[in-house]
Image (cartoon, grey):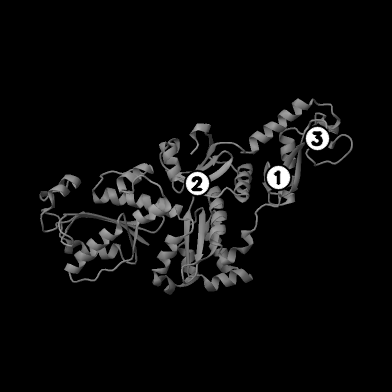
């Protein structure tokens, strides 16, 4: 649990500043569960430069509550949380100082979004809150006011959680939260899980990720893990002390995150999924008569593949559909191995390429149509799908036929502006498993839309 905080102060000498305004969002990693904001009477004068910066003056604060009047509410809303702030050292110091004046010891672990952004989004021109969130396309209102800045920090933190593919943030938070170890284990984990699409992470007592999975219904999938009596499930049940999760909205994004993060984190109970996801691929070659043939073959990274398949049965099933949809020849797609005409020719569904009756150019044109529809080699495009809530969309970037990564956006200019698009995309590795996932998913499922990109728009 996190407390996203922003504080405005009077300015002045170190450790003599007073709070003029505070905003807190209690955030469970996915949504706001509580919030509080208030002007505060600091019982001292505000420095003139601060008045010009924030617009908060002494007159506005005359009837505002003093810090001791809101202290109890602050303790309640930040209980069992990690403080998150932009320049967290400052906000944490100010809060600690105010509570010290009341004779109350206030100690919290903290995360700084400046430091996290410098690590997870390198090479930005500026890491000041205003310039950074604008560069990332995150809306910000009431700049230098506590509520506006805290809300922008929250949106920035959500983006940083997405970009943290090595799960360092969540691992640290679990390590710092010993109360998790005291909760009734499995039932509580199931009760706290969402019924939405996303990726889930099982942690041991040290916060280390021991298993990563994806599901369209995380609660249902965890129930299966924790009620199964197979050997691996029993081991997991003994070791797991906490489950964290990241919602994706899009199943395709969840599949890609799962694959990438298993490879990066190498959880002990994901050994089977570290292997290649596909065993067969579809290749092409031109025969002696000039016809383009399709061929299912064993997966080989050295050979160009049109698309890939998990197993041979899947490959054969898909190839039958391709042959039917594009009116291709079963002999030239390797489904009917004969010396003469194919079976489809006998029932007048093949136009005769198998016996050289159909013109080479006409047949190859349909094969090329299939290749254009089903291969994204050299293509530049965005795959747009559902996001984590009704106002959000997910985006997957394909550049020069290479998978570059994914992100989430609320406003169209975030994906039409190449610089902003680059910032919101979480970079991922363009390996054959990722290509297999994308091609297989698009073959079987619909997404909201696919947006072709002009070559000059690549990032």
Task: Please name whichever residue, 249 or 124, is drawn nearer the observer in this view of the structure.
Answer: 124
Residue 406: mark in rendering: 2
Q: Dot 2: few (<14), some (14–19), or many (≥20) neighbours within 10 Å?
A: many
Q: Residue at x 68, y 46 (%)?
A: 308
Left or right side of 332 for 424: left
Left or right side of 431 for 315: right
Kindly report the distance in space between the C-alpha atoms of the residues bearing marks 2 and 3: 39 Å
Q: Earlier in the sequence, mark 1 or mark 2?
A: 1
Residue 303: mark in rendering: 1
Q: Residue at x 82, y 35 (%)?
A: 344
Left or right side of 450 for 40: left
Whether tag 1 and tag 2 are in contact, CB under 8 A, the answer is: no
Q: Dot 3: few (<14), some (14–19), or many (≥20) neighbours within 10 Å?
A: few
Kindly report the distance in space between the C-alpha atoms of the residues bearing marks 1 and 2: 27 Å
Is residue 112 visible in this depiction of the protein?
yes
Q: Nearer the viewer, mark 2 or mark 3?
A: 3
Image location of residue 323, percent across then percent down:
74, 37
Task: Give the residue at mark 3.
Answer: 287
Of the 4 image quadrants, the one containing the N terminus is bottom left
Q: Earlier in the sequence, mark 3 or mark 1?
A: 3
Kindly report the distance in space between the C-alpha atoms of the residues bearing marks 3 and 1: 17 Å
Q: Earlier in the sequence, mark 2 or mark 3?
A: 3
Task: Please name whichever residue, 274 or 77, is drawn nearer the observer in this view of the structure.
Answer: 274
Q: Secondary structure at mark 3?
A: loop
Q: Residue at x 45, y 42 (%)?
A: 422
């Amino acid at each position: 649990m996190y407390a996203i905080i922003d504080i405005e102060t009077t300015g002045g000498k170190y450790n003599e500043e007073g709070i003029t305004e505070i905003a807190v969002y209690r955030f469970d990693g996915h949504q706001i569960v509580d919030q509080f904001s208030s002007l505060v009477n600091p019982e001292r004068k505000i420095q003139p430069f601060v008045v010009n910066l924030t617009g908060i003056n002494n007159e506005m604060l005359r009837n505002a509550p003093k810090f001791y009047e809101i202290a109890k509410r602050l303790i309640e809303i930040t209980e069992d949380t990690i403080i998150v702030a932009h320049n967290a050292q400052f906000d944490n110091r100010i809060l600690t100082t105010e509570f010290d004046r009341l004779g109350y010891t206030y100690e919290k672990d903290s995360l700084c979004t400046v430091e996290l952004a410098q690590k997870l989004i390198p090479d930005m021109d500026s890491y000041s809150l205003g310039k950074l969130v604008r560069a990332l396309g995150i809306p910000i209102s009431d700049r230098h006011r506590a509520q506006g800045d805290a809300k922008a920090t929250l949106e920035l933190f959500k983006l940083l959680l997405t970009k943290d593919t090595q799960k360092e943030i969540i691992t640290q938070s679990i390590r710092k939260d010993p109360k998790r170890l005291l909760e009734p284990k499995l039932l509580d984990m199931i009760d706290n899980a969402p019924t939405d699409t996303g990726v889930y992470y099982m942690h041991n007592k040290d916060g280390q990720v021991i298993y990563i999975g994806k599901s369209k219904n995380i609660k249902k999938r965890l129930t299966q893990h924790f009620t199964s009596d197979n050997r691996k499930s029993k081991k997991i049940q003994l070791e797991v002390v906490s489950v964290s999760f990241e919602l994706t909205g899009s199943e395709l994004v969840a599949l890609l995150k799962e694959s990438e993060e298993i490879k990066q984190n190498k959880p002990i109970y994901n050994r089977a999924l570290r292997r290649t996801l596909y065993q067969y691929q579809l290749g092409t070659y031109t025969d002696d008569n000039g016809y383009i043939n399709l061929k299912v073959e064993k997966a080989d990274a050295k050979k160009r593949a049109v698309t890939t398949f998990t197993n041979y049965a899947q490959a054969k099933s898909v190839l039958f559909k391709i042959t039917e949809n594009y009116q291709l020849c079963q002999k030239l797609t390797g489904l009917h191995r004969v010396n003469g005409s194919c079976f489809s020719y006998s029932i007048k569904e093949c136009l005769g390429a198998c016996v050289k009756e159909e013109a080479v150019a006409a047949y190859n044109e349909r094969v090329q149509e299939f290749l254009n529809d089903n291969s994204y080699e050299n293509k530049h495009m965005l795959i747009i799908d559902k996001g984590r809530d009704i106002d959000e969309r997910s985006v997957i970037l394909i550049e020069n036929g290479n998978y570059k990564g994914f992100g989430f956006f609320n406003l169209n200019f975030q994906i039409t502006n190449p610089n902003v698009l680059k910032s919101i995309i979480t970079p991922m590795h363009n390996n054959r498993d990722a290509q297999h996932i994308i091609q297989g998913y698009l073959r079987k499922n619909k997404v909201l839309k696919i947006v072709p990109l002009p070559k000059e728009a690549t990032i």
